[in-house]
Image: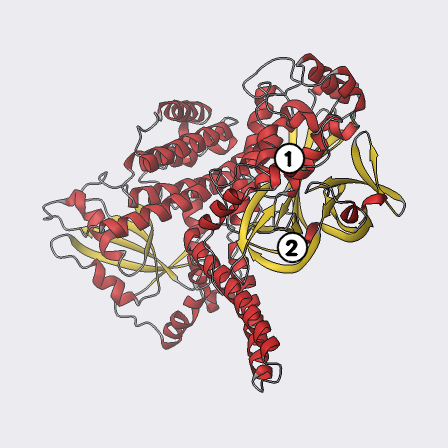
Amino acid sequence: MTQFSDERGGELRELFFETAQELLQSLNEEALKLEKNPGDAETVRSIRRIVHTLKGDAAACGYRELSESAHEVEDALAVETASSHTGLAEVAFVAADIFAAMLTSYRQGAKLPSAEPLRKMIQQLGKDSSSEKPGKRKLSKASAGKAEWTEYEKLEIQNASNLGKRVYHIKAQVDPHCAMPVAALQLLMNALATVGKVIAARPETGAHASTEPLEFLFASSVSVEQIRAKCRIPTVIARANVELIKGKVSNRKASAKKSNEANGVSVESIPEDAPTSAGEEHEDREKPHLGAVAENILRVDAERIDNVLNLVGELIIGKSMLQQAFQELAKHSPKESMRGRVADAMAFQSRVLSDLQRSVMKIRMVPVEQLFRRFPRMVRDVAKQCGKEVDLVMSGQNTDLDKSLLDAIAEPLTHLVRNSVAHGIEDAAERTRGGKPARGTIWLDAYHQGNQVIVEIRDDGSGIDSEKIKAKALEEKILSREEADRLSEAQIRGLVFRPGFSTADEITEIAGRGVGLDVVQSVLHRLKGTVEVETHPGQGTIFRLKLPLTLAIIKALLFRVEGRLYAIPLNTVAEIARARESDLHRVDNYEVLQLRDQVLPLVRLGRPSAQPSQQAGKIFVLVITLGKRKLGLIVEALEGEEELVIKPLDDQTVSTDLVSGASILGDGRVVLILNLAAIVERHTNSRPGEPGHVTSGILLSHADRSRVARTVPEVQP
C-alpha cells in the first residue's frame, strides 16, 4: 500500500483536525435538536451521517482509537429502536466530548482519554433496544435474498444521483479456489475505489465465507464496462453482476418519472453486452460541474493572509512616502511639466491600493457564526449544572468580523454567557413567583454599526443590583463610604469588572471566584474596544461589546502634545472644538468645558503651560465618544488625518496600557497610537483628590521614544 510522505501526511492530518472540529460542532447541534425532539428519526440519521464521516476520516489518518469509537456509536445509531430511545441524545453529547478530547490528545501527542464511559452507555442502549423489540434487532441474512440498504445509504444514493453520478448494485461471487477469501472484499473495494465511490458493502469486512456473495453500492460516472473490468480480479472474483439503481433523481429520464416509493430504490439489470448510450456519456460529461462548487473553496493558513496584509501595510507606508516626496518636489519645482502626469499616476496607484487593502481585509473576515455555534451546547450544560431551564436565541450570525478579533473575543464572550446563566437567570421557582416564564432566555446578537461590530449578550433575568455591588465593594474595602456615595450608577456597575470582585454568595464550579469579568474588560481594551453594561432590575441585563472591524489599518487623527506626535482612531472623534484656558472650569477637581448645552468632562494629555501668554492662548479639544461616554481631550496642535498601519508594541518597549501601538509616517517619523478605552477608564476611576490629567502614563521620555523607534524601524524618505 502506498504510504503518504511526512509532509503530505501532515497536511492531511491538519485538514482532518479542521474538518473534525466542524463535524463535532454539527454533532453537538444535532444532539441538541434530538434532546428537544426525542424520537426524531431524521435527526438520528443526521447524527449517524456525521459519526460515519468522522469514522472514515479518522481511519484515513491512522487514528484507530477514534475510528473504532465512532464505529461503535454508528452501530448504536443503526439499532432499529434507537430513534425512540430517550438516552440517545446523552450518548451523542458524551461521544462529542470524548471525540473532542481524543482530537486534543492526538494534536498534543498526549495520552488518549478512556472511551469506556461511552462504551457502557452504548451497551446499555443496545440492551434497552433489544428488550423493547427482541425480534427486530438485526436483519436476517436470508430475509430478502439480497442486501437491504439503510436509510443513510439510501440518502447517499440520492446525493450521488443529484451530483450526476449513476449508482450501481454490484454482486460478486468469490472464486472457490481463492487462497484468501477473507481478503476478497477489501481487494474488490480497493479496485472499485479507483473509478468511483463505494457507498456500502455487504457483508462487513472479514465476516464472510467464500460461498457468500459480495454486494456493493457503488457511485461512479464511468461506463459499465470499466466497472466490470475492475471487478475481474483473477483467482479472487469468479463472476460479477452490475445493476443500475434508479433513485429519485438519478438522471434526466428518471426525473420525469414519479416514484410511488417514499424511501425505496429500484434496480435495473444491465446486460453484459449493453453499451452506454451517447446521451448518457454526454450527461456524464455535463453533470460533474454540479459538484465543482466545493472545488472553488480554498483552505488557506491565516498566517499567509497576515503576511499579505503586512505587505499591503508596507505599500501604504510607501504611498505616504511617495506623497510626501511629491509635495516637497511641488514646492521646489512648481512649474515642472511632469507634475500632472505624476499626480495622475499616484492617484491611480492610490485607488488600486485601496481596492487591494479592502480585498485582503475581506479575506480575513469570517462570520461570527463560527464563534456563536459553540454556545448552545455550553448554555445547555451550564444550565443543567445550575438546575435551571434556559433557552438561547441567536441572531446576526452572518455578521463579519476579523478572524483575529473573533478568536480574541471567544474567552470574554464565554465568560459573559456563562455569567448570564449562572448569575442573571433565576431558578424556575423564583421566576414563577415574579410572574415570568419558568424558562429563562438569553439572546446573543451581532451587528455592524459604522466602523464597529457590536456583540450583545442579553438576558431576561434579575438584573444587576447596584446596592448589592456597593455593599460588596465596601465589605472588600475597595471603596470608602465617601467614595461610594459619590459614584454614579454607571460607575457602580463598572465595579463588576474589578479583578477578584464577585457578588456570588457561595463559590461553585461555575461562579463566585471573581475571575471572568476583569478578563472581559482587559481583553476589550487590548483590542481597542469597549464593554458596556445596561441593566434593569427584575427585567434583565445587557452586556454590549464594541469592537473595531480590524486592528491592522486605521484612519487616524494626528495631534501634538508637548511637541510630540500622537494619534487616535478617527471614527471615535465626534467633533473638534476650540477653546481658551480661561473657558475651562473645575468641578470636584475635574476640568470641564461648557460646550453648547452640555458639560463636557476633560482629560488633559499634557501639563498645563506655566507661561501666562500661552495660558491665554487657544487650545484644541477633541470630543471623543466611547460607548455612551463622551470626553474632551485637550491637545496643543493638530497634524491632520492619516491612514496608519498599526505595529504592536510589547511590554518591554512601552509598559503603560495607555498606548496601544505605533506607526510610521511617510517621512519616517514614529507616531504613538493612544488607547482611548484605557484613558477613559483611568479618568472614570480616578478619585476626586487626584489630578485630572494622565500625563505620567502617556508622555514618554526621550529614552522611551528612542526604544519605540528601534522597535518600529524608521523608514527614511
Q: Residues within 10 Å of mark 2 (few under 14, many from 20)?
A: many
Q: Is residue 524 above or below residue 489?
A: below
* Secondary structure at numbered mark 2: strand
User: Do we see residue 39 in this rendering?
Assistant: no
Q: CA distance from mark 2 to mark 1?
A: 44 Å
The image position of residue 452, as x and y in percent, is 66, 50
Which of the pair 536/594 is nearer the observer?
594
- First along the sequence among labels 2 and 1: 1
Residue at 64% over, 55% down: 556
Q: Nearer the viewer, residue 216 or 678?
A: 678
Q: Secondary structure at mark 1?
A: strand
- Residue 558 got which mark? 2
Type of the residue with mark 2: Leu
Residue 319 image point, x, y percent? 53, 67
- The amino acid type of the residue labelled 1 equals Leu
Give the image quarter of residue 331.
bottom right
Position above or below: 282 against 570 = below
108, above or below 300, in the image: above
Q: Quadrant of residue 337?
A: bottom right
Instruction: Residue at 63%, 21% (x, y): give it.
Output: 501
Answer above or below: position of 580 versus 421: below
Left or right of 301? Residue 550 is right
**Residue underneath mark 1:** 392
